[in-house]
Image: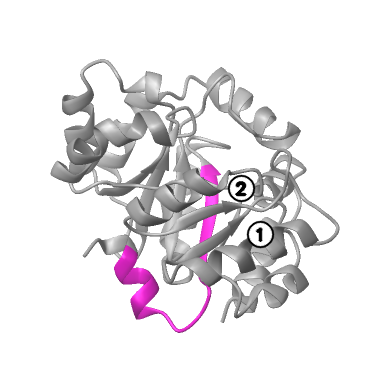
Amino acid sequence: MSKILDKFKEKKKLIFIPFFVAGYPSFFFLEDFLLKYKDKIDILELGIPFSDPIADGPILEEVNYQAIKKGVNFENTINWLKEKKIPSQITTILLLYFNLIYQNLEKNLQRIKEVGIEGLVIPDLPFEEAESFLELFKSYNLDLIFFLSPTTNKDRKEKILKLAESFIYCISVKGVTGEREELSSDGIRFIKGIREKSNKPLVWGFGLSRREHIRALKGLVDGVIVGSAFAKRILEGKDFESYFLDLFEETL
């Protein structure tokens, strides 16, 4: 069983998955933050900055841009992970783009595994093309995490639910990442439909920013991903840590 799936089986709460872009605002900031709050992060989703991120709204686009301007890339992120071990309490997955690792794929997967990564989210690797790589990812003990969204057709949905190894990343809106005033009613109906078909862990992504959002999802999903809301507060220089703790407490 994968370490990612273990997290869902161990916890009697919503799994809390903060998303950060590597190297933003700095690697030092992330080191300090992860060490300080290691007991409050179930799974870390760490994004490798990319010039044309798929489905990211203006906040995460800006953060990707700022990280790239600082020179952050796949190579120095892997080197940082190698030198600065993420606390063992935190299970880490990488969000990256396939064209960053496609050349020398096996060597890159080995390097990713060696720095403690347990799974991959690859937005530019569609499910149909990913199928041919699944055995290779498995050989390196890396879970490939698939997306489902309200626009995923029935046949595709059934295949993904069958092949998913750990959790299903549920894109809850028809649109890009970013804070929403309210949870999408379409997203809730969509996830209820998935729940009727599968017992695999479901994680709500896109749009979360408030405690009441997380409270409303208890009993419906198994985990929540928060990214844009954190990035926005860091960009604006607001009290990010208090906000992080506030959302974490609602997952308990």
Would residue 140 appear left or right of 72 to someone viewing this image? left
Q: Secondary structure at mark 2?
A: loop
| Residue 228 seen anywhere in this rendered image of the structure | yes
Residue sticking out furthest to the front: 155
Nearest the viewer among 149 and 110 is: 149
Q: Secondary structure at mark 1?
A: helix
| Residue 184 seen anywhere in this rendered image of the structure | no
Task: Kindly identify the residue that appears in the image at 70 percent across and 77 percent down.
Answer: 215
Compared with residue 81, is residue 90 higher up or lower down, i.e. above or below?
Answer: below
Q: Are marks 2 and 1 in contact (CB under 8 Å)?
A: yes
**Magenta region, residue range:** 5-20
Compared with residue 128, is residue 195 higher up or lower down, i.e. above or below?
Answer: below
The numbered disc on residue 190 is: 1
> Which kind of residue does numbered mark 2 sit on?
Ser
Q: Position of residue 121 (x, y in %)?
A: 43, 41
Which color mode does the image show?
one colour
